[in-house]
Image (spheres, rainbow, N blue to C red):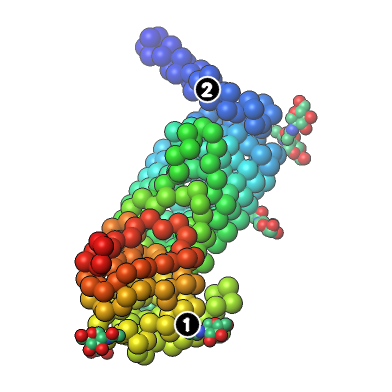
């Protein structure tokens, strides 16, 4: 029995003293009185959380043993705007992370991440002020999660400690009703410092009174035909397919900036592809998985001599086959 008690005391002390490198990470970023010395949040440790600080250094992990309700968490985290360390929420019964709705920035220590997984009751994340992070993000196996509700998350950055490897955003095994808003997808896609891992998320239906997003008309087109295409549409939700017979209509696409879908140009007798001059972003099949599919495919265009996509950003996959010179 005495042995057991000693082991217990030792392990408590061990948990209170972070390893050297972790200590360095905290020391350069926070006052000691704004540093949380535990790496697990539960009904005991949470009393030590420096809840008066807006910038906090903490390794925050909540799990099935945390046993803290939203009502207990809310006051403790209400002042936190910047968190240095990590945030892992796993196996909890939390319905959301709104207790962190004031959090604006999460800066991860090396080899740590923002992980939200196996939370069986979570329907939304709801960190609505969260805007900046250098963390890898893994949102997985939250079977009731319908929405991220992360409307401001757009400032992805890297720190030296990332070794210049871009952080990956992975989202998978969520509710069958899960969807990502076009605004969220736009924020993620336009980030230079972000890669997508498995990202199995369909787009939410888009409907505003004007059908405009950032001043540009959005059209959901599930059955694209160039002859029927409305030239006023600048952002398309759906896959764009150009085939034999469409040659005469392709210039209608000149002003398209975003395709929330894929592009296929198959078996035309186009000699040049110069009608996607305004195209900046191509995402993924709106019903598919980011990363699972080539975004722009140009195949079997026997007369094709040149193709230019002068404004395409962050393009990751492009396939040319069966054209002159390919
Ligand atoms: C936090 O602030 C309150 C009110 O300003 C103060 O009474 C309390 O002592 C502070 N707590 C800590 C841990 O500094
Ligand atoms: C932390 O402690 C210092 C002095 O040790 C004090 O000046 C400062 O106000 C404290 N910060 C908070 C947020 O309690
Ligand atoms: C969880 O907390 C509730 C209320 O705070 C308490 O009644 C219950 O015993 C706790 N459960 C565990 C496993 O600690
Ligand atoms: C979120 O940010 C807005 C704008 O800066 C601010 O007015 C609001 O108080 C913040 N919300 C929380 C919960 O801190
Ligand atoms: C979008 O709308 C269609 C028909 O209006 C509906 O069947 C579908 O479930 C909606 N999708 C989402 C993600 O809300
Ligand atoms: C898609 O368009 C083609 C050609 O216009 C038509 O034959 C087909 O029925 C349409 N499919 C759907 C699902 O609307
Ligand atoms: C594209 O935009 C320009 C400038 O606003 C306009 O003159 C032109 O007609 C548009 N083209 C198409 C195909 O919509
Ligand atoms: C493409 O080829 C077909 C078949 O050879 C021909 O009928 C058609 O006029 C051609 N179209 C263009 C734009 O050259």
Horizontal placement of 205 versus 153: left or right? left
Alpha carbon of mark 2 to alpha carbon of mark 1: how far?
52 Å
Mark 1 secondary-structure assignment: loop
Decide if residue 183 is on the left or right side of residue 116. Answer: right
Residue at the location (57% across, 59% down)? 152
Q: Is mark 1 within 8 Å of ligand 7?
A: no
Around disc 1, counting alpha carbons within 10 Å, would you say few (fewer than 14), some (14 to 19), or many (20 or more)?
many
Q: Nearer the viewer, mark 2 or mark 1?
A: 1
Q: Position of residue 312 (x, y in %)?
A: 46, 63
| 199 sits to left or right of 10 | left
Q: Residue furthest top?
A: 2
Name the residue tied to disc 1: 233
Displayed-image quarter of ligand 1: top right
The answer to which image quadrant residue 172 occupies is bottom left
Q: Which residue is mark 2?
A: 21
> Which residue occupies the foreground of this view, 304 or 225?
304
């Amino acid at each position: 029995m005495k042995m057991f008690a000693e082991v217990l005391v030792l392990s408590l002390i061990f948990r209170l003293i972070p390893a050297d490198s972790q200590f360095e990470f905290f020391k350069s970023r926070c006052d000691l009185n704004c540093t949380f010395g535990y790496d697990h949040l539960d009904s005991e440790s949470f009393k030590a959380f420096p809840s008066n600080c807006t910038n906090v250094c903490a390794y925050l992990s909540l799990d099935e043993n945390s046993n803290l309700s939203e009502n207990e968490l809310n006051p403790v985290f209400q002042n936190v705007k910047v968190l240095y360390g990590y945030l892992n929420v796993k196996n909890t019964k939390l319905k959301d992370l709104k207790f962190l709705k004031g959090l604006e920035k999460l800066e991860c220590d090396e080899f740590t991440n923002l992980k939200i997984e196996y939370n069986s009751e979570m329907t939304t994340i709801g960190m609505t002020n969260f805007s900046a992070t250098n963390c890898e993000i893994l949102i997985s196996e939250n079977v009731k999660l319908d929405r991220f509700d992360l409307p401001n998350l757009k400032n992805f950055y890297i720190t030296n400690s990332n070794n210049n490897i871009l952080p990956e955003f992975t989202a998978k095994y969520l509710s069958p009703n899960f969807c990502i808003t076009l605004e969220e997808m736009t924020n993620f896609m336009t980030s230079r410092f972000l890669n997508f891992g498995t990202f199995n998320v369909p787009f939410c239906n888009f409907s505003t009174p004007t059908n405009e997003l950032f001043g540009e008309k959005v059209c959901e087109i599930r059955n694209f035909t160039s002859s029927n295409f409305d030239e006023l549409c600048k952002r398309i939700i759906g896959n764009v397919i150009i085939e034999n017979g469409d040659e005469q209509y392709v210039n209608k696409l000149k002003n398209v900036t975003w395709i929330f879908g894929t592009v296929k140009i198959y078996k035309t007798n186009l000699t040049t592809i110069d009608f996607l001059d305004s195209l900046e972003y191509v995402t993924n099949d709106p019903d598919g998985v980011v990363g699972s599919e080539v975004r722009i495919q140009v195949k079997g265009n026997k007369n094709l001599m040149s193709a230019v996509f002068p404004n395409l950003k962050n393009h990751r996959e492009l396939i040319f086959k069966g054209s002159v010179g390919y």
